Image (spheres, helix red, strand yellow):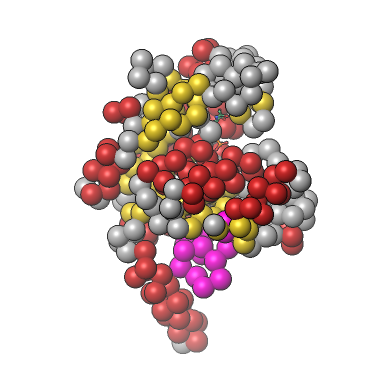
Amino acid sequence: MKELIEKADILIEALPYMREFSNKTVVIKYGGNAMVNKDLMASVLEDVTLLKYVGVNPVIVHGGGPVISNNLEQYELETDFHKGFRITSQEVMQVVEKALIGEVNTNLVSLANSLGIKAVGLSGKDNQMILAQKCEMDCEVELGYVGEVDEVDPTLLNSMIDSNYVPIVAPVGTDKEGNSYNINADLVAGEIAAALEAEKLMLLTNTEGILEDPEDKSTLISRLKIAEAKQKIEDEIIVGGMIPKVNACITALEKDVNRTHILDGRLDHSILLEIFTDKGIGTMITK
Ligand SMILES: Nc1ncnc2c1ncn2[C@@H]1O[C@H](COP(=O)(O)OP(=O)(O)O)[C@@H](O)[C@H]1O
Ligand SMILES: CC(=O)N[C@@H](CCC(=O)OP(=O)(O)O)C(=O)O
């Protein structure tokens, strides 16, 4: 009986959060390094199903870096990164599109549909939803078809949300001429959260959150303000793949998304633990 009452307590703890998030949009970025197996993907999508049933509007943006790297290896094409971005020649871009849109996106959509979510897959090219421009972050290195988001048109996503679908977005953008661009998925998630005026942005990854010492999980930082996060990038405590995540949170916060979180996507039901428990998990970045 005690166990049953504890289960009821968990539901009661979740109740105020269910009320708070009902009819609100939550953007979830699911990253390649936390997508390591089908069970984990199913656990993430189960959380998304529950969100949908309690009236939250989830939007998923996925990565797929490791899948792209595997496919490039099969084609014997080299992968080079510059400041966390994959240098993307025209040949590499073709593999990126096939991997992200033709493989990762369709697999996620199929799995989501099999779990009872009305999921629809799309990329930033659909209806020119994500207008991109060539990323000119560093003049010294030619990044090729690496893009940065110029503008997100939220019309298509909003009409899907209004019709009760869960959009699953691949991070490929386009320019007005129809050229495709490879965009870091964290940055896409931040811009989509901003365009949808989402309540929350959640970036799922393969660490507990932001760590003071990446080798030591006990050094998890639960809360960080924008200025503190920028300082940690400058001090090189936050490096590599964590930098675009922090930048995505900053973009979203500056464009009025209320809450942003970086959390462990390897942990079963991390989304529910973050949204529906008093303590939350991972790192929350705030204004
Ligand atoms: N301060 C930090 N705390 C935690 N992880 C960090 C930190 N700085 C850099 N990282 C690295 O960032 C990685 C997450 O980025 P990335 O591998 O690109 O994830 P994803 O595939 O989920 O997008 C972590 O695995 C870790 O190696
Ligand atoms: C420009 C750039 O680097 N794009 C990424 C897009 C996929 C991505 O961001 O995947 P993760 O979230 O799994 O890292 C890439 O080519 O790997």
Q: In the image, is 130 to the left or to the right of 165?
A: right
Q: Name the residue nearer the viewer: 184 or 153.
A: 153
In reply to whether residue 273 is colored magenta, the answer given is yes
Query: What residue do we see at 41% from left, 79% from top?
Result: 12
Q: Is residue 236 above or below residue 5?
A: above
Any part of residue 32 in sight: yes
Check if residue 113 falls in the magenta segment: no
Q: Residue at x 34, y 70 (%)?
A: 19
Q: In this rendered view, identify the residue nearer to me: 163 or 53.
A: 163
Count of numbered circles in the view: 0
**Rendered view: 232 above or below 133:** below
Residue 39 appearing in the image: no
The stretch in magenta equals 270-285
Q: Is residue 56 left or right of residue 280?
A: left
Camera-nearest residue between 104 and 91:
91
Q: Quadrant of residue 125?
A: top left
- Which x, y percent locates residue 73? 62, 20
Residue occupying the point 53% across, 48% down: 249
The percent coordinates of residue 148 (x first, y second) are: 50, 29
Quarter of the image for the C terminus: give it.
Answer: bottom right
Q: Residue at x 36, y 54 (%)?
A: 25
Please state if 83 lies on the left or on the right of 255 as rendered: right
